[in-house]
Amino acid sequence: MGSVFKFKEFEVNQEGCAMKINTDGVLLGSLVEAACPVRILDVGSGTGVIAMMLAQRFPEALVDAIDIDEVAFFRSEENFLKSQFADRMTAYCGDFETLEPSNRYDLIVSNPPFYINTLHNPDQRKRLARHTDLDFFKRLIRFSKERLVEGGTLQLILPADLSDEIKVYTDSEELILTRTVNVQSFSDTEIIRKVLTFSKSENDNKQCSNFVIYHQKGIYSKDYRSVLKPFFLAF
């Protein structure tokens, strides 16, 4: 894959970024559900691809993106400025807990690093992008509780087993799980990822659905093609 990934309405230069565009990121960007968000935040934004997908999907929204890695920050800022969404997008560099200005958000998203208790990559930047510990999620959930408007949502894509481990943190911050999308490679294989929506407001209409990536080996499912058709040139 070259350093520039071309989508239908924007391009993403990912040269030098520790975490490249991947299936998890584009799935989160396409599966997020929100009703006309005014302001969106992408935490750990990397190349900025999720933020740009959301800027395309929600044309009235202001989109902020933050990453602790300087190369990712500069690359995402460059990508934003070259896009048609430039006047609505802002990139920040640093820890999300120190984010200024202290905006409130209708939607916070993250495709976080999720390799926990495994052998860490010796490359420090790749380690930051790919490895974390449960304290990261504790901090992200607390931050989201503080920064979300009433009725706002935190939406994450996580490995299936990790989604159960963070429940203790969402429960302690009174963020309520309102939607689960179980992601499978094939219809007869195990759940590999979950897209989770947590809300500050109770919702009696809790949703749970399955999403299959491949119809068969090498052939994407109708659902995958449908949600990514607005973005991928191949579809």
Image: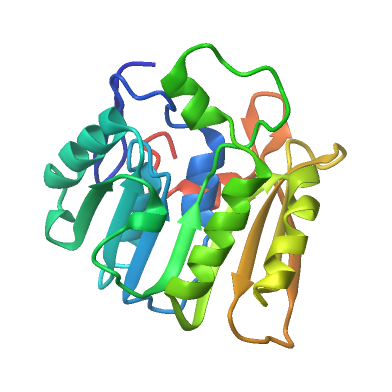
Q: In this view, does 125 lie to the left or right of 154?
A: left
Q: Position of residue 126 (x, y in %)?
A: 47, 21
Q: Tell me: residue 43, above or below residue 145.
A: above
- Most distant residue in the top direction: 122
User: Which residue is located at x 66 percent, y 40 percent?
Assistant: 213
Going 52% across and 45% down the picture, which residue do you hit? 111
* Nearer to the camera, 219 or 162: 162
Check the image and report above or below for 191 versus 206. Answer: above
- Decide which of 89, 145 is in the foreground and name it: 145
Q: Of residues 215 and 70, which is closer to you in this image? A: 70
Residue for point 38% across, 78% down: 36
Residue 27 x, y percent position in the rendering? 54, 46
**Quarter occupied by residue 21:** top left
- Quadrant (top left, top right, bottom left, bottom right) of the N terminus: top left
The quarter of the image holding the C terminus is top left
User: Is 81 on the left or on the right of 124, as rendered?
Assistant: left
Q: Nearer the viewer, residue 60 or 66?
A: 66
Q: What count of labels does the image hold?
A: 0
Q: Picture coordinates of residue 78 (x, y %)?
A: 16, 37
- Give the vertical position of 206 relative to 189 (above or below): below
Q: Quick check: can you spot residue 174?
A: yes
Specify the color scheme: rainbow
* Residue 209 in view here: no
| Position above or below: 53 against 198 | above
